[in-house]
């Protein structure tokens, strides 16, 4: 059980074709068998010979780099001698950092639109693979801090770093799979809802064509509560729920003060529903008012001055919705928005979504889309390979599978040492793996071949 170590090992260098990422071969096999390599080729069909490397292979370089934990263009240098990575990208020699950067800067908006379509292709393929029956779309923005000289970045509304320049990309996800449906890069100084009307219209129409007959739901936070957004949601005929600020001009405060009976949600929360006429928007909507009991006196100006009953203090929130379900069901549905925050955390922490790759707008916008594409492919791979356990549906409409993070997948599957050999002239990948890892790899091979 114990080994004797008498001194440091002597370090020598070798040119042997060794790989630290033997598990990448399984992911490459998945891309080939499921047709995703062909779809990536289609995106860049008329750019196939735009450089010595080609946009198809350069895209695989980005996906492979992000899969293996690279966060900067310079990190590609660490993979220059990895034979499995060369096989994954179909390249005998990897591009330099400068070549990589120039390629990213050369991707125009038209190609990014095609990448957005590819994002939805992967997401709805996973949705169909899981035999799901409902489509829930979450839309939200997230802040990415940049340097001072980055193109298109401006000082925005970052709560902790208000003086830093930033991007504020708008993202949409398919809640049932936790995959990204769209990413639109924006300057850090735009309003949260900037571009959301066009995005929602396109996503709803696209979801209807991809999942005919499936119920479609949309949920948004209070930053998107505007007449134009509400008009799109009502006209589309989808079910929606959206936080609505307690503006004084809505006239809801008097109803709250007069309210005597509240429907119990849980030990701390209660609610009531009311039909509210919004004259400014020429519309009557259902509004659900929630209150939550808090301990202690609220902070000064924490919320509008409502009332302070003798038995404690409350926080208030409101949701505008066309759902006919109970107040409790609407509460749980809105609580499911937290799944989008987890997806954004996964993107930023594990596939370098928050990395500002260059100082160019086009390059950084393309990087965000390729990061989201890598995330979507990882999720689809887990469902296909049987690594994602099914989960029961709940009122929160969160992910229907228990997914592993990309970091976990990287450690347990991708980062397996291996060597490409040629016994009898036939290429063979020999992996050094534990018995549990060997059984896992064999199961994945069977799933991919099915």
Image (cartoon, rainbow, N blue to C red):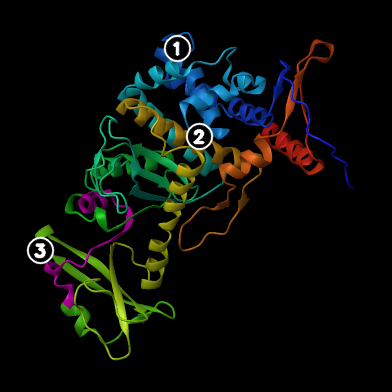
Residue nearer the viewer, 51 or 260: 51
Question: How many numbered marks have been drawn onto this rendered protein structure?
Answer: 3
- The answer to whether residue 121 is left or right of residue 2 is left
- Of helix, strand and loop, which one carries label 3? helix
Percent coordinates x, y for residue 352 in the rendering: 46, 37
- Of helix, strand and loop, which one carries label 2? helix
Residue at mark 1 = 48
Percent coordinates x, y for residue 206 in the rendering: 36, 39
Q: Residues within 10 Å of mark 2 (few under 14, many from 20)?
A: many
Q: Residue at x 73, y 35 (%)?
A: 446
Q: Which residues are magenta?
A: 229-253
Q: Residue at x 24, y 45 (%)?
A: 156
Residue 32 appears in the rendering: yes
Residue lying furthest front: 7
Residue at mark 3 = 279
Residue at mark 2 = 374
């Amino acid at each position: 059980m114990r080994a004797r170590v008498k001194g440091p090992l002597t370090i020598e260098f070798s040119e042997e074709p060794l790989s630290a990422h033997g598990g990448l071969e399984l992911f490459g096999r998945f891309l080939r068998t499921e047709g995703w390599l062909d779809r990536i080729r289609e995106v860049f069909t008329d750019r196939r010979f735009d450089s010595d490397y080609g946009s198809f292979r350069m895209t695989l370089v980005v996906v492979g780099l992000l899969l293996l934990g690279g966060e900067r263009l310079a990190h590609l240098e660490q993979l220059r001698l990895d034979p499995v990575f060369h096989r994954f990208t179909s390249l005998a020699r990897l591009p330099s950092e400068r070549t990589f950067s120039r390629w990213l800067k050369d991707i125009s908006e038209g190609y990014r639109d095609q990448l957005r379509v590819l994002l939805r292709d992967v997401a709805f393929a996973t949705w169909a693979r899981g035999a799901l029956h409902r489509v829930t779309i979450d839309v939200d923005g997230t802040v990415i801090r940049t340097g001072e000289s980055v193109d298109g970045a401006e000082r925005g509304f970052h709560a902790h770093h208000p003086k830093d320049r930033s991007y504020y990309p708008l993202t949409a996800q398919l809640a049932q799979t936790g995959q990204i449906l769209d990413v639109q890069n924006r300057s850090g100084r735009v309003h949260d809802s900037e571009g959301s009307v066009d995005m929602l219209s396109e996503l709803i129409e696209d979801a209807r064509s991809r999942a005919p007959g499936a119920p479609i739901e949309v949920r948004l936070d209070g930053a998107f509560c505007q007449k134009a957004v509400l008009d799109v949601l009502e006209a589309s005929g989808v079910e929606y729920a959206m936080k609505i600020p307690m503006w004084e001009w809505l006239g809801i405060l008097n109803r709250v003060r007069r309210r005597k009976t509240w429907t119990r949600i849980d030990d701390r929360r209660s609610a009531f529903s009311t039909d509210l006429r919004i004259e400014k928007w020429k519309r009557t909507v259902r509004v659900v008012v929630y209150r939550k009991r808090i301990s202690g006196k609220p902070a000064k100006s924490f919320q509008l001055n409502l009332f302070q009953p003798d038995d404690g203090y409350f926080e208030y929130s409101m949701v505008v919705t066309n759902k006919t379900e109970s107040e409790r069901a609407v509460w749980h549905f809105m609580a499911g928005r937290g799944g989008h925050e987890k997806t954004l955390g996964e993107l930023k922490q594990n596939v370098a979504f928050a990395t500002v790759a260059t100082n160019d707008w086009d390059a950084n916008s393309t990087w965000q889309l390729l990061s989201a594409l890598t995330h979507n492919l990882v999720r689809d791979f887990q469902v296909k390979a049987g690594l994602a356990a099914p989960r029961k549906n709940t009122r929160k409409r969160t992910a229907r599978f228990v997914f592993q993070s990309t970091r976990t997948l990287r450690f347990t599957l991708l980062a397996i040492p291996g060597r490409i050999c040629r016994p009898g002239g036939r290429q063979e990948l020999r992996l050094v793996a534990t018995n549990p890892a060997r059984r896992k790899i064999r199961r994945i091979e069977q799933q991919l071949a099915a």
